Amino acid sequence: MKGKMLKTVVRPEMLFGLETVALKKRQEAELDVAELKMLRFSMGGTRMDRIRNEDIRETAHVRCFGDKVREDTLRWFGHVQRRNCEYICRRMLRLELPGRRSRGRAKRRFMDVVREDMKLVGVREEDAEDRVRWRQMIRCGDS
């Protein structure tokens, strides 16, 4: 019951707007920690009980927060890919600004994150044209 509460109330609030953001690994880990704190609290446990995170997730039937963010990002990307080529969001995905990028390590762009996620899940951009198949392929399994 408490896992359902987390999935229907808390998690959507945490995920709101994250499908269009290029999260860094540290930010993803911080969100994962926050979710685990809420799960642990809702189950009546504390850190002093030394219950493993995997056991808490298994008990609540909840997958890793990063997997859910990845699924939402790819779902949004598929939605945009199926739109008309003149659709502004679709044009913005492929936008290359003139000029040079700043010095140093390149910042993570949204399309870089999407490409990493697609490689991890094992899908291609062309697969997004079939909505039902795309949703099945990117599904993380706990919603």
Image (tube, rainbow, N blue to C red):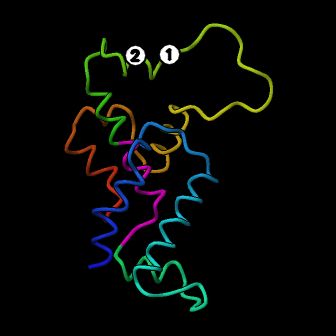
For mark 1, give the secondary structure: loop
Quarter of the image that includes the C terminus? bottom left
Quarter of the image that includes the N terminus? bottom left
**Label 2 packing within 10 angstroms: few (<14), some (14-19), many (20+):** some
Please indicate whether residue 6 sits to the left or right of residue 22 in the image.
left
Residue 73 colored magenta? yes
Measuring from the top left, give residue 104's x and y in whole percent.
Answer: 80, 29
- Say which residue appears at 48% left-offset and 57% top-offset: 66
Measuring from the top left, give residue 8's x and y in whole percent.
Answer: 27, 63
The residue closer to the viewer here, 29 or 90, is 29
For mark 2, give the secondary structure: helix
- Rendered position, 17 above or below 140: above
- Say which residue appears at 71% left-offset and 18% top-offset: 101
- Residue that extends furthest to the bottom in the rendered view of this protein: 49
Which residue is the site of mark 2?
A: 91
Q: Are marks 2 and 1 in contact (CB under 8 Å)?
A: yes
- Rendered position, 107 above or below 33: above
Residue type, mark 1 in image: Leu
Measuring from the top left, give residue 38's x and y in whole percent.
Answer: 46, 72
Please indicate whether residue 106 sits to the left or right of residue 115 in the image.
right
- Rendered position, 136 above or below 113: below
- Residue that extends furthest to the left in the rendered view of this protein: 132
- Say which residue appears at 44% left-offset and 19% top-offset: 92
Q: Which residues are magenta?
A: 62-74
Residue type, mark 2 in image: Arg
Magenta region, mostly helix, strand or loop?
A: helix
Write down the quadrant of residue 140 in the picture: bottom left
How far apart in space, not on screen, are marks 2 and 1 (Cα)? 6 Å
- Say which residue appears at 34% left-offset and 75% top-offset: 61
Residue 44 colored magenta? no
Please indicate whether residue 132 sits to the left or right of residue 107 in the image.
left
Q: Which mark is residue 95?
A: 1
